[in-house]
Amino acid sequence: MEKMSRVTTALSGSALTGRTMHCHLDAPANAISVCRDAAQVVVAGRSIFKIYAIEEEQFVEKLNLRVGRKPSLNLSCADVVWHQMDENLLATAATNGVVVTWNLGRPSRNKQDQLFTEHKRTVNKVCFHPTEAHVLLSGSQDGFMKCFDLRRKDSVSTFSGQSESVRDVQFSIRDYFTFASTFENGNVQLWDIRRPDRCERMFTAHNGPVFCCDWHPEDRGWLATGGRDKMVKVWDMTTHRAKEMHCVQTIASVARVKWRPECRHHLATCSMMVDHNIYVWDVRRPFVPAAMFEEHRDVTTGIAWRHPHDPSFLLSGSKDSTLCQHLFRDASQPVERANPEGLCYGLFGDLAFAAKESLVAAESGRKPYAGDRRHPIFFKRKLDPAEPFSGLASSALSVFETESGGGSMSWFVDTAERYALAGRPLAELCDHNAKVARELGRNQVAQTWTMLRIIYCSPGLVSSTNLNHSVGKGSSCGLPLMNSFNLKDMGPGLASETRLDRSKGDTRSDTALLDSSATLITNEDNEETEGSDVPADYLLGDVEGEEDELYPLDTEHVHSEEPEYVLPQEAFPLRHEIVDTPSGPEHLQDKADSPHVSGNEADTASLAPVDSSSSLLSVSHALYDSRLPPDFFSVLVRDMLHFYAEQGDVQMAVSVLIVLGERVRKDIDEQTQEHWYTSYIDLLQRFCLWNVSNEVVKLSTSRAVSCLNQASTTLHVNCSHCKRPMSSRGWVCDRCHRCASMCAVCHHVVKGLFVWCQGCSHGGHLQHIMKWLEGSSQCPAGCGHLCEYS
């Protein structure tokens, strides 16, 4: 600290001198404020309320405003402000909803002056009027803003923001009657203190709560806002509609924002959590801060420029119980450490590449800012080379465009719109999604859906009519494991012994069903046949006296016109010459070489003659469920999801997660699932697929994802007749007692989907309004407003 430089600034006859320094406080600070002569600073918090003198070398405690034996909640401060016209006047916002004013000119130890107890919840912000000495404005967690005249004991006006809480209020420096207020629902409202019944203007500034705002000290209409969405936005309020001029992207929620004096485009910010540093931004370069102060070790809660005309000194208070004075010259500049090279793919396949201008100019032999290089679509405007950035860390940008149609993402949009994720059985979902992928030419994805159906869905039942072949016709179609043979190829003794052995088996459960049309023999101890789906014929017989074997036969010798043979009626075979006896060893050799037969295929057989006089039988395996359990494939499915995610296809990963549900969700950690969901939802929203995005959010089981569509769901509606906010939950206005949901076209009550104009509050049935605006841009209610519908 001792080596830090000193700065002296001349301000209207007086001089500000100092260096970077800090002092330890008794407790964490919630807010700070500087008096008008820049010589003192007040620090307020839950357990601290002190005034410090700012000397050249150090902070010196001057006054402790927490007096009394018993601590009071009135002294627990959420905000503090020092009047810029009266150096003896302070105001604090208490956590119990009390607004307290303090008169430093009182001779007693207790400097408390007035107490206002009209707010019901914590007061978040207090603000004095810049030119009116007795006007004080407050904003509370109860959603109300109150204007106090310090010459009276009660508030003179109450403003209702129709929101849950007010986070900040600030009087305009240039407009005498105007003040701005920010709310937790993301809205910013502009009010005229003479009209407390309704705001002059309201617009949505951020996606989430807006924590702070600050009017520009020089430009009349510039308003800076900071919110939980990690953005600082600069709005031009002089136009008919609030126009966003600049947007600064930070790395954490923005808790405070203050314009830097004498520097039109500079502002300072601090974070509400995570980030402890203070940043000074040039809004023309929104991604890299111009300066950074790193003295604090905990969250910075309050920042203030020491003098409204001195840009060199910045004061800050923090939860680490320190009060710091930062010298701008001692701040670190991240721009000096910025990497001038970068590479990024665009949404539609364009490639942007940035490198040092010296390297690009040396390699290409031309100036890097040639006219043949265009800026990509994400540049809001072309930077002026005369601006003070060219000497810091400038890069030459080259953009390589993809060929027309080469980087088309139409398949992503079509897949997202046509996929079925819920509402049907799993098998139908898989089949439908496979069909969609196949029609879009994504064969690998289609095959994946088909495999998931096979793994997790039970196979369909096969009817008995498809179970056996029609052997009388010599049919070879049907199930792959159907077998047929003719008893002319089988010796009578072989057939008898086979039937005898099966009747003696005591370790098998055999059932024989014989009638005039079929003979059925089943065995429960058979195994699943492994092999191809090519039909094969087998012969039933004995091998080694114990196990039944199936002998492959040539189907070419089986013809429907050959004479049929019947089973012999005698106990012993007649003495006649037996012809066409099959050679057993050759068939055994063929059997051993056959890849389609397993060891116990003959354990279960069905012998079904065509009729009572036919000896041509059909042998088939009984169908039964011998599939592997789905858990056996859990690792494979998990690896498949990771494969698609690593390839960039989070659409497939999320779709499978939703469709399979708990079958696969338990195998993937919660953090990975959340990352996939958020990535897919971000892509859907980039393509404006809002309905699909909302469906994915609803179907997700991750808490962090399912709450994305639960924020900012409150809808504030004005009555279309009296133009006042609707306070009740119904559709009847409490003030004019008229129904607000009347269709401006048909003049009937709208009981279904209702659409209205945010400018004039008139609306009606969706189809009626769409048809009306096709032929006219005027409001159908006749108010003269130019309504828009897109």
Image: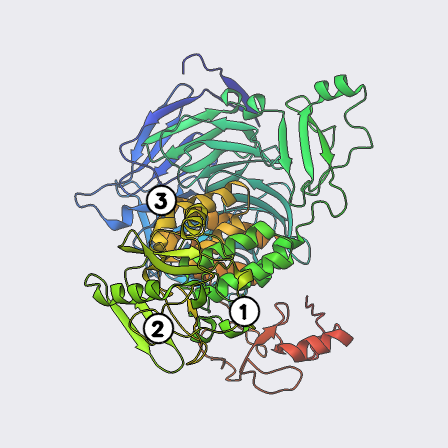
Q: Are marks 2 and 1 in contact (CB under 8 Å)?
A: no
Residues 674 and 116: in front is: 674
As drawn, which residue projects farthest toward the left? 69
Which residue in the protein does label 2 denote? 520
Amino acid beneath label 1: Ser
Q: Secondary structure at mark 1?
A: loop
Q: Is residue 219 visible?
A: yes
Name the quarter where the N terminus is drawn: top left
**Front: mark 3 or 2:** 2
Which residue in the protein does label 1 denote? 475
Mark earlier in primary sequence (3, 2):
3
Amino acid beneath label 2: Leu
Residues 37 and 763: in front is: 763
Residue 725 position, x and y percent, is 51, 71
Q: Secondary structure at mark 3?
A: strand
Mark earlier in primary sequence (3, 1):
3
Residue 510 position, x and y percent, is 26, 68
Above or below residue 155? Residue 337 is above
